[in-house]
């Protein structure tokens, strides 16, 4: 016992009797306890060591449960914080994924506004010939043509398609438009694949309830072999059909034209209405005619009026058909370098590209994992630090309060 | 104890080659300190055993550069004791056998020891702890500072205050008798 260490002599002298009494009063452990503890230490604290030392058995389910609860309580804060952090990250990732999935769908909605507007116009046209108010109608007799075409990559085409709906004379907000469209697609493939590509084109047309007006398939060497298809696709299927056709082989070019035929349609409808009214008026006049001369003259006018009405009806039907069905021309060209989509030319460049792609995916996955793990780790570390501080504080408080 | 423990530290404090040495050199002091702080023999046995088990589990993480093995061990025992005090606060009051002098010791001045023990038990835990560390466990001021986190220069002053309180408590207890 080193009571003298760092303890001033005068203090030792002052408390000498007390120090001696304390030394004598030093608590001594029970020999049975010390023997049991010696054994536990020698045995490296086996699982049931506490039964021998403290007399408590901790082997039953209840004791295990109690130990588990005690451990849980001891680690309650970090565990809770970890779970909360995990939940937070899951929610954040979920919201992020939801946002990502919402983004394209918004784009799709925007991009389809062109076709939707056009389609709804077509649908309404076929369902009812009642025109809308003139406010939304452009200048009569001046059909507007909106063309967006070029020889571009499929990706940029998709991009162009997704943005084209928001611009030009077919901007959103105009209802019941009548739009006539045209599309031209050029696909590239190898000479030996022309027939397969042609069959695929026919299948796509069938899938979209289209019509093959004309087709021509030419065999031969690269440059000579090819095919051309004149198709009619329902306008409301046009976007999907063009997308499917573009994916059959290498897309060389794709162009789409739109023509706003709202004005001529409305004009024709008005003229037809007028013509029909005139026919009915003439019929009434004819029934009231007294003289043969009057009747002859009215009958002549009636013939002309009926002829004009029939002509206008035919014109209106043509316009409606033009809005409902879109002519699509698909040309298949051949050259040796064209891919057929069957990866038959897969080589070292493709391998490098694939490897790069895989590395990119792996890096992305690692980044996502880090994005999840780092916040959780930070939250857990903060929680552990808080837990430690809380335990220290409660220990200090326990010391002060006892 | 014939079995040599596997947990051997060659870079630990001088004289403490392995955990067995540490245990042998500090068992009784640890018990005395814990019993003095907790005022309960049964709880002191539990906490002492628990402290040595914790120390055994953490022995491979002990770094002698950060302090003495003895100070480290007493730190573990202190934390276990304070946890016991925390638990008591939330659970049941003291019902175990209180710490008292051994009546079978023929050399002991039993009356004086009982008086000191009773007086010590009336002191706040902070004072009991310092007195126990200093006079039951025999730690020097530097080791007490390591164990409690009090600055070494402040340890002497705090012990002096505790001893003053103890002396006063003894006088009051004597007066009551």
Image (cartoon, coloured by chain):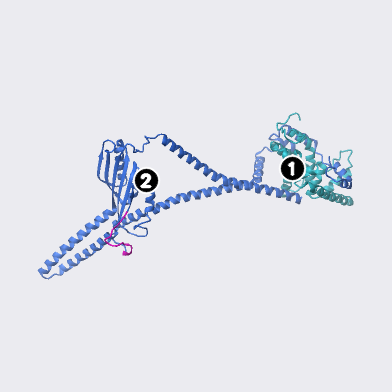
Chain colours: A blue, B cyan
Left or right: residue A388 versus residue A103 is right
Which residue in the protein does label 1 denote? B75
Q: Residue furthest top?
A: B2
Left or right: residue B133 versus residue A151 is right
The answer to whether residue A207 of the structure is visible from this angle is: yes
Q: Quadrant of residue B110?
A: top right
Q: Chain of mark 2?
A: A
Judge whether A97 appears above or below A298 on screen: above
Q: Quadrant of residue B98?
A: top right
Which residue in the protein does label 2 denote? A154
Which stretch appears magenta?
A134-146
Q: Position of residue A271 (x, y in %)?
A: 23, 63
Q: Residue furthest bottom?
A: A290
Residue at the spot x=34%, y=49% of the render? A239
The answer to whether residue B91 of the structure is visible from this angle is: no
Secondary structure type for disc 2: helix
Q: Is residue A140 magenta?
A: yes
Q: Position of residue A148 (x, y in %)?
A: 33, 52
Q: Quadrant of residue A315?
A: bottom left
């Amino acid at each position: 016992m080193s009571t003298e260490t760092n303890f001033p002599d005068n203090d030792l002298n002052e408390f000498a009797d007390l120090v001696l009494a304390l030394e004598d009063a030093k608590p001594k452990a029970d020999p049975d306890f010390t023997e049991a503890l010696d054994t536990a230490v020698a045995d490296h604290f086996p699982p049931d060591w506490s039964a021998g030392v403290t007399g408590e058995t901790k082997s039953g389910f209840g004791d295990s449960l109690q130990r588990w609860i005690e451990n849980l309580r001891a680690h309650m804060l970090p565990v809770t914080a970890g779970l909360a952090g995990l939940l937070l990250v899951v929610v954040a990732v979920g919201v992020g994924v939801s946002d990502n999935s919402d983004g394209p769908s918004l784009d799709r909605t925007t991009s389809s506004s062109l076709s939707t507007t056009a389609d709804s116009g077509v649908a309404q046209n076929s369902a009812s010939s009642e025109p809308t108010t003139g406010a939304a109608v452009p200048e009569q007799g001046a059909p507007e043509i909106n063309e967006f075409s070029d020889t571009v990559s499929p990706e940029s085409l998709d991009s162009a398609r997704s943005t084209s709906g928001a611009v030009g004379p077919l901007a959103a907000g105009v209802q019941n438009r009548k739009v006539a469209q045209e599309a031209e697609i050029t696909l590239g493939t190898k000479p030996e694949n022309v027939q397969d590509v042609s069959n695929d084109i026919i299948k796509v047309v069938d899938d979209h309830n289209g019509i093959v007006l004309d087709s021509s398939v030419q065999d031969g060497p690269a440059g000579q072999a090819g095919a051309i298809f004149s198709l009619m696709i329902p306008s409301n299927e046009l976007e999907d059909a063009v997308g499917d056709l573009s994916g059959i082989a290498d897309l060389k070019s794709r162009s789409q034209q739109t023509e706003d035929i709202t004005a001529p349609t409305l004009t024709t409808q008005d003229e037809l209405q007028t013509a029909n009214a005139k026919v009915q008026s003439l019929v009434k006049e004819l029934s009231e005619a007294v003289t043969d001369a009057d009747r002859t003259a009215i009958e002549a006018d009636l013939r002309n009026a009926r002829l004009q009405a029939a002509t206008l009806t035919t014109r209106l039907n043509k316009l409606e058909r033009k809005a409902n069905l879109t002519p699509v021309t698909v040309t298949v060209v051949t050259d040796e370098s064209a891919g057929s989509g069957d990866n038959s030319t897969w080589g070292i460049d493709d391998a490098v590209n694939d490897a790069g792609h895989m590395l990119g995916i792996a890096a992305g996955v690692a980044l996502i994992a880090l994005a999840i793990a780092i916040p959780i780790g930070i939250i857990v570390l903060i929680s552990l630090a808080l837990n430690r501080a809380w335990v220290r504080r409660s220990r200090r408080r326990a010391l002060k309060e006892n | 104890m014939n079995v040599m423990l596997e947990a051997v530290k060659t870079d630990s404090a001088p004289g403490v080659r392995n955990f067995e040495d540490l245990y042998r050199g500090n068992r009784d002091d640890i018990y005395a300190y814990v019993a003095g702080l907790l005022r309960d023999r049964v709880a002191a046995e539990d906490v002492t055993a628990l402290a040595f088990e914790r120390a055994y589990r953490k022995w491979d993480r002990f770094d002698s550069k950060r302090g003495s093995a003895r100070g480290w061990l007493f730190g573990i025992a202190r934390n276990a004791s304070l946890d016991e005090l925390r638990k008591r606060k939330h659970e049941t009051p003291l019902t175990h056998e209180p710490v008292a002098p051994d009546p079978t010791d023929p050399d002991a001045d039993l009356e004086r020891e009982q008086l000191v023990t009773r007086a010590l038990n009336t002191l706040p835990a902070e004072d009991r702890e310092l007195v126990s560390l200093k006079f039951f466990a025999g730690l020097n001021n530097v080791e007490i500072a390591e164990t409690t986190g009090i600055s070494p220069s402040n340890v002497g002053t705090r012990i002096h205050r505790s001893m003053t309180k103890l002396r006063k408590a003894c006088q009051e207890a004597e007066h009551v008798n």
